[in-house]
Image (spheres, rainbow, N blue to C red):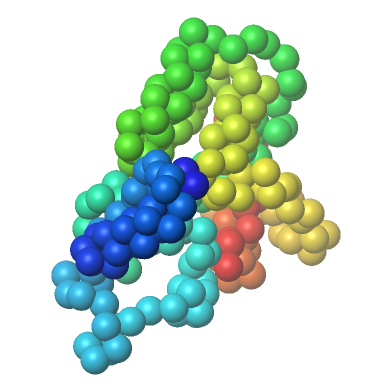
Amino acid sequence: FDIHAGAIDLLFPHHENEIAQSEAATGKQFVKYWVHGEHLSVEGDKMSKSLKNDLTLRDLETRRISPLAFRYLVLTSHYRSRLNFTWESLQAADSALTRIYDTILDLKTKKATGARTDSLISRETEFLAALSDDLNTPRAIGVIQESISAYHKNSESISARALLAFLYKADQVLSLGFKKIKPVAIPSDIQLKLTQREDARARKDFARADALRAELTHLGWTIEDTAQGPRLKQTRS
């Protein structure tokens, strides 16, 4: 078959034995590509139960961090490089992934018009080239972030439809849940508090406006003030 994965400590003798046994039995090449992943460290130490630093996805969810944030974190490191896990790096990965999700929601609200620009076509090519270069996922993630930054810097220069199509195509490989991102229905009571906040700001009653913002934050909603007006975002759990 094409790809055989495994940790670096299985390179010898385990995988050497697999090759010897399988090719002796079939007379054919066993595997075309071997992908040996480096080990994961936790706060600079080897992860092990004896050190009581072993983690599970449930530990992430307890801290209200999406397991996909861990996947994103892993993808920002090359599989041949040792990854040192810290809660700070995971939080940074979660924030970076949230920014991508917010961009996808923004792209969905824009009119699906316009053609791909040369810069976006170049980035799509660079994304595929990175993956072809020994699965260079850190560079592939970098290309996505550069595309998003360019869009936010000048949203008129890149087609919303084309950028969204690129992100969906990239996610066929990365599996970070891009296509599952959908606008969240805002409950009427939350919308009312937002309206009341805007009324308070118009009256220059900033103390009341700040109090309403704090209430919304406590209820799991953040307000992003934009040139087009305030936008509500639900805090992801």
Taking depth in this image into account, of 9 and 128 the one nearest to the observer is 9
Question: x and y percent of residue 224 in the render?
Answer: 56, 46
Residue 190 vs residue 144: left or right?
right
The structure residue drawn at horizontal position 16% and vertical position 70%, both measured from the top left corner, is: 44
The structure residue drawn at horizontal position 44% and vertical position 14%, both measured from the top left corner, is: 122
Residue placed farthest to the right in the image? 188
Question: x and y percent of residue 1 in the render?
Answer: 49, 47
Taking depth in this image into account, of 132 and 84 the one nearest to the observer is 132
Q: Quarter of the image containing the C terminus?
A: bottom right
Residue 62, visible in the rendered structure:
yes
The structure residue drawn at horizontal position 53% and vertical position 41%, both measured from the top left corner, is: 173
Residue placed farthest to the left in the image? 44
Residue 46 vs residue 75: left or right?
left
Q: Quadrant of residue 25?
A: bottom left
Residue 116 vs residue 30: left or right?
right
Q: Quadrant of residue 189?
A: bottom right
Tell me: residue 210, above or below residue 147: below
Residue 86, visible in the rendered structure:
no
Question: x and y percent of residue 183 in the render?
Answer: 73, 47
Taking depth in this image into account, of 65 and 211 the one nearest to the observer is 65
Taking depth in this image into account, of 149 and 48 the one nearest to the observer is 48
The structure residue drawn at horizontal position 17% and vertical position 75%, both measured from the top left corner, is: 45
Tell me: residue 191, above or below residue 203: below
